[in-house]
Image (spheres, rainbow, N blue to C red):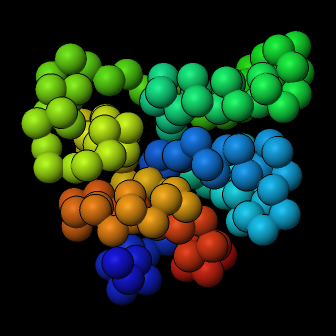
Amino acid sequence: MNITGIWKRNMVHRLFLDANVILDYTLKRPKWHRASKFILEKVVEGEYKGAVSPVVVHIVSYILGKHLGPERTKKIMLALLNDVKVIDTPHKVILQAMSSDWPDIEDSIQYFTALHHRIDLIVSRDEGFIKKAMPALPVIHPEDFVKTFR
């Protein structure tokens, strides 16, 4: 989806951050660290409001714990959650996601949670997630976010 033609900088206020964006930043993954850092810095600066679901917190905490240990993971997650809000996933949203035609259950739960909370844009590196998005709530690759909203 071509975000540039649809969104303007002043129209995007709330970003849903997929687990891969947070992991790219925290684990300093060379190929994607720059874009994820840009996005998270903009959230910390207050230019955008960041949001994640409990599923993202769970995934990121689990993977960071494997790489960095529990104490360092807790410090990182607490720092992240100072600037990024955890949004709930109501029962009806889970049912909606499970009833959808999305083949990736985790992506569908994230998507319908963000849609429920009227998030403006989802940022993810997951190509399947990006392709499955509907016009009502686009999903954009972090590199495309940087190009579009720099």
Camera sees residue 66? yes
Quadrant in the picture for residue 8: bottom left
Between 62 and 123, the one lying in front of the other is 62
Quadrant in the picture for residue 144: bottom right
Across the whole image, how many numbered discs are drawn on residues? 0
Q: Is residue 48 above or below residue 65?
A: below
Question: Residue placed at 31% from the left, 38% from the top?
Answer: 105
Q: Residue 62 at x, y = what percent? A: 67, 24
Q: Residue 138 at x, y = what percent? A: 34, 63
Q: Is residue 26 above or below residue 94?
A: below
**Residue at the extreme top of the image, as rendered:** 71
Q: Is residue 140 left or right of residue 100?
A: right
Could you tell me which quadrant the N terminus lies in? bottom left
Q: Is residue 28 left or right of residue 139?
A: right
**Residue at the extreme left of the image, as rendered:** 99
Q: Residue 141 at x, y = what percent? A: 53, 67
Question: Residue placed at 57% from the left, 23% from the top?
Answer: 58
Could you tell me which quadrant the C terminus lies in? bottom right
**Residue at the extreme bottom of the image, as rendered:** 5
Q: Is residue 98 left or right of residue 40?
A: left
Question: Residue placed at 87% from the left, 13% from the top?
Answer: 71
Quadrant in the picture for residue 30: bottom right
Between 19 and 119, the one lying in front of the other is 19
Q: Is residue 126 left or right of residue 5?
A: right
Question: Residue placed at 79% from the left, 26% from the top?
Answer: 66
Camera sees residue 111? no
